[in-house]
Amino acid sequence: MLQLRQSQSLQQRLTPQQVQYLKLLQLPILALEQRIKSELEENPMLEESSNDEEREDQVSEDSSGDAVEIDVAPELDGSIASIEDPLGVSAPDLTAERLLQQTRENEERLRDAQTEPSNEYSIEDYMNDDTEGFKSPASNSSDDEREEMPRAASESFLESLYNQVTMLNLPDRFRALAEEIVGSIDADGYLRVPLEQIAHDTGISFGEEYTTAEAESVLRKIQKLDPVGVAARDLRECLTIQLDVMSNHNPTREVARKIIRDHFDDFVNKRFTALGRHLAMEVHDLKPAIDLIQRLNPKPGAAAGDTGAGTNYITADFFIERTADGKDFTITLNERGVPPLRVNSAYKDLIRKQAPEHGKSLTPEAKDFIKKKFEAAKFFIMAIYQRRETMMRVMHAIVTRQRLFFEQGEKYLKPLIYKTVAEDIGMDISTICRVVNGKYCQSDFGVFELRYFFSEAIHTHLGEDGENAGGEAVANKVVKFRIKEIIESESGAEPLSDEKILSILNGEGFDVARRTVAKYREQMNIPVARLRKKLM
C-alpha cells in the first residue's frame, strides 16, 4: 500500500559560489592565469583594469609585501539585490539589446572557429560598440600580447633512426624489414619483440618471406646506428655492441668484453673478488675495465630521445625572502600574470541609465542576461580575492611553524600535520589540502612543494651529549636527510649496511627501526650496500 509521508531533515550543501572558490583555490598560478583568461572571454561583464585608469575600489598591499591588486566595483559591497532594482526600473535601452545580440553572435563565431588555427577572441570581440567605456583587455595590458617562445625544430628518436636506415642503401626488400624493426624499438632503445615475429609480420604485410638469419643480419646493421647499441635485446647485448665499436687500441676493452660476455652476473652483483679470480687478475687491476663499462650507455633510446622540448619548469606560487635586517621574512604571492579585474564600466553605466523617462524598459531576456553576467563577474572577483587571502594565511602559518627551516636549512625541518595549520588559521583541513597540493614556494634553500613542509614525527631518545639529546620529535625528512649524508660519506670499498646506519642514527638520538632505515633508503632510490660497492 502506497503512503505519502512528509519528513524534515538538515543537509549541508555547497553553493555555486563556494564551489567556484574551492576550484580556484586548488589551481596553481599558471592554471589560474588560464582560468582568468577563459572567464574574461566568456563573461563580457568582466574586464581587466588598466593601470592608468581610475581605480574605483582598490585592495591595498598587505604587510607581507604582496603587491597584487584586485579591483572591486562599488556594487560588490552590497548584496545581490543591488542590481535587481536598476533592472526592475522601466526604461528603454536599445544599446543593451544590441550588446546582447552581438555577444551571442560573437559566441557563435567563437564556437565555429574552434577548428581554425590562431583564432583568439578578446573582450573587444564581445563588446565592440560605439559606446564609450568599452575597452579591450589587450589594449590595457601587454601580457596578452606575449607569445610563446619559438622552439627549435628537433628530430625525434624514431625519425632519426628512420633517416639513418635510408642511408644504409639497403635493397627495398630489406628496407621494409629494417623499418619494421625500428618501429618495434621501445622508448629505452631496446627491441623487446622477438625477431622471428618481426620477420613473420613483415612477410605478411609486404608479401615477402624472410628468414631469421636475414632479420638478424639487418638487425646487426641497425644496432650500429647512432646511438650505438640501439635495438639490443638485453643489457648485455647493448653493452657488448658498444664495446665492439671501440678502437682496438684500447687495452682495457678486451678485459671489459670478457667481463660482459662471460661473467656478467658477477659484474652486476659487484662480486669483484670472484671476477678477479675468474680472470686471474688482482682486484685493483679490474678498475679500468669496470670504469669503462660504467661509462657505457645502458639506455640508448632514453638519452637520444631527451631533446628538452618537453621539459617542464616549476613556477613558484610564493617567494620567501628575508627582510633587510635579516630578522623576519617577506612572503610574496606570485600573481604577476594575474590582471586586476573589475566589472565592465560600460555595463555599469548601462544599468545606472535605466530611468522611467526613457519610456521603454529592457526586454526580460536582456535583464536576465545582464543580471546573470553581473553576478558571475562579482562572485568571480570575490573568489579571486578570497583565494589570495586564504593562500597567504596558510603560507604565513607554515613559515611560522617552520621558521628554523627557512633560517638554517633542511636539517631543521619540524614535524607538521595539516590539522595543526588548520587550527592556527581557523580553517578546515580540506582547505589546507587544496592550498598545498601542487603549489610551490621559492626560498633561500631552493624551490619546495608546500607538501614538503608536512611530515610525520620521529621521536628521539635521551642521550648524554648528542645533538638530539632533548628527546624532542623531529620530522622524518630530517632522518632521510641524515641517512643520505651517512651514505654519501661512506667508504666505497666498504659501504655501510642498514644495520650499521641504524647504529649511527641511534647513537645520534634518532629512535628508528632497521626496517624504517631500509624504507627511507628505498624511497630515495639508494641501492643496498652490496650494490654500492666500488673499486678503490
Image (cartoon, helix red, strand yellow):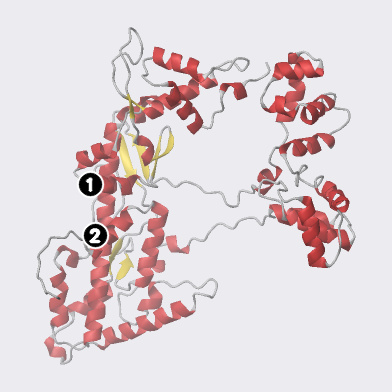
Residue 259: which numbered mark, if any?
none
Side of 118 relative to 265 (left or right): left
Q: Nearer the viewer, residue 491 or 328?
A: 491
**Picture coordinates of residue 371 (x, y %)?**
22, 76
**Picture coordinates of residue 83 (x, y %)?**
16, 74
Q: Residue 81: in sight, yes or no? A: yes
Question: From what the image shows, is residue 515 above or below residue 93?
Answer: above
Residue denoted by label 2: 18
Side of 416 relative to 87 (left or right): right
Q: Amino acid at mark 2?
A: Gln
Residue at 75%, 54% in the rendered image = 182
Side of 442 relative to 294 (left or right): left
Residue at 39%, 21% in the rendered image = 512
Dot 1 falls on a residue whose secondary structure is loop
Image quarter (top left, top right, bottom left or bottom right) of the C terminus:
top right
Dot placed on the residue nearer the N-terminal end, 1 or 2: 2
Dot 2 falls on a residue whose secondary structure is helix
Circle count: 2
Q: Determine the image quadrant of residue 503.
A: top left
Q: Residue 136: in sight, yes or no? A: no
Q: Amino acid at mark 1?
A: Asp
Q: Determine the image quadrant of residue 347.
A: bottom left
Q: Nearer the viewer, residue 278 or 312?
A: 278
Residue denoted by label 1: 428
**Picture coordinates of residue 291 (x, y %)?**
72, 25
